[in-house]
Image: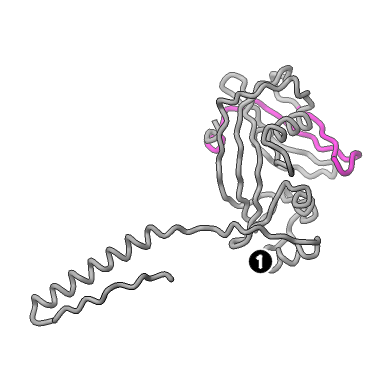
């Protein structure tokens, strides 16, 4: 119940003095109510959504007012891609408001005052996705953030686990909710593990790496990397 029961204060309105007392009492009650309302947290429902099929998934999106028909164009991924993320445990769905929950690890790799940033990705179908983001990877079912970090670095940069050295003193966690570029109209709630790492034998200048698709090995994703001064958005990770 939003409003608590407040004892009734009866003030005899006799003359100007009574009117003044009534006004002061009303102001005090308004102040108390305002302060109480300020302390009421506005929370999101963290109940997980469990869907048995792809058709149920599409119906859930439709019922939540998410226009997934425009997905798969430009920077946006397809509904099929999100469904695969859900099946692999990389993404979960939450209600009220509708949003996807993503647990990822962000790896900060330094070169002097610069950090390693993936500027864009190019797909075999010609699509280009701007990234401007450090190396990162979603956690899969049963993975720790270190497992995901090693897997992502090895897959995207083509390095071996032996070439990676993590700085555990740099580890911290960031929580954020924002609009999604990959899936427009569907909010994204991120639980981000952040850690710094040293990686041997990386090129000192901008470079590219190729990553074959796990589902379709004949298709390749090309990653474009550069050493950049951190932007204001990236400074929060450092």
**Left or right of 45, for residue 27:** left
Q: Residue 44: x percent and y percent?
A: 54, 58
Quarter of the image with the N terminus is: bottom left
Q: Residue 57: x percent and y percent?
A: 75, 62
**Left or right of 233, for residue 198:** right
Element at badge 1?
loop
Seen from the viewer's position, the closer of residues 15 and 126 is 15
Q: How is the image coloured?
A: one colour
The magenta stretch spans residue 220: yes
Q: Residue 211: x percent and y percent?
A: 82, 34
Q: Is residue 170 above or below residue 68?
A: above
Residue at 90% of width from left, 39% of height from top? 217
Query: What crowding class fits label 1: few (fewer than 14 Cα within 10 Å), some (14-19), or many (20 or more)?
Result: few
Residue at 65% of width from left, 37% of height from top? 105
**Dot 1 corresponds to which residue?**
65
**Left or right of 28, for residue 116:** right
Residue at 66% of width from left, 53% of height from top? 100
Which portion, as a residue range, is magenta?
208-234
Quarter of the image with the C terminus is: top right
Picture quadrant where residue 18 is located: bottom left
Seen from the viewer's position, the closer of residues 124 and 142 is 142
């Amino acid at each position: 119940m939003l409003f608590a029961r407040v004892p009734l204060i009866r003030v005899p309105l006799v003359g100007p003095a009574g009117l003044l007392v009534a006004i002061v009492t009303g102001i005090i009650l308004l102040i108390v109510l305002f302060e109480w309302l300020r302390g009421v947290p506005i929370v999101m429902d963290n109940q997980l959504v469990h869907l048995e099929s792809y058709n149920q998934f599409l119906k859930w999106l439709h019922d939540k007012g998410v226009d997934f028909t425009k997905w798969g164009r430009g920077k946006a991924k397809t509904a099929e891609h999100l469904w695969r993320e859900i099946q692999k445990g990389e993404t979960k769905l939450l209600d009220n408001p509708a949003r996807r929950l993503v647990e990822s690890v962000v790896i900060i790799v330094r070169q002097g005052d610069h950090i390693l940033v993936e500027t864009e990705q190019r797909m075999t179908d010609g699509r280009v996705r701007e990234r401007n983001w450090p190396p990162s990877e979603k956690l899969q079912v049963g993975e720790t953030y270190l497992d995901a970090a090693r897997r992502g670095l090895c897959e995207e940069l083509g390095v071996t686990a032996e070439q990676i050295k993590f700085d555990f003193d740099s580890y911290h966690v960031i929580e954020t909710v924002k609009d999604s570029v990959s899936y427009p109209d569907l909010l994204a709630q991120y639980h981000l593990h952040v850690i710094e790492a040293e990686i041997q034998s990386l090129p000192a200048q901008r470079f590219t790496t190729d990553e074959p698709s796990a589902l379709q090995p004949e298709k390749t994703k090309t990653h474009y990397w550069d050493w950049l001064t951190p932007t204001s958005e990236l400074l929060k990770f450092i």
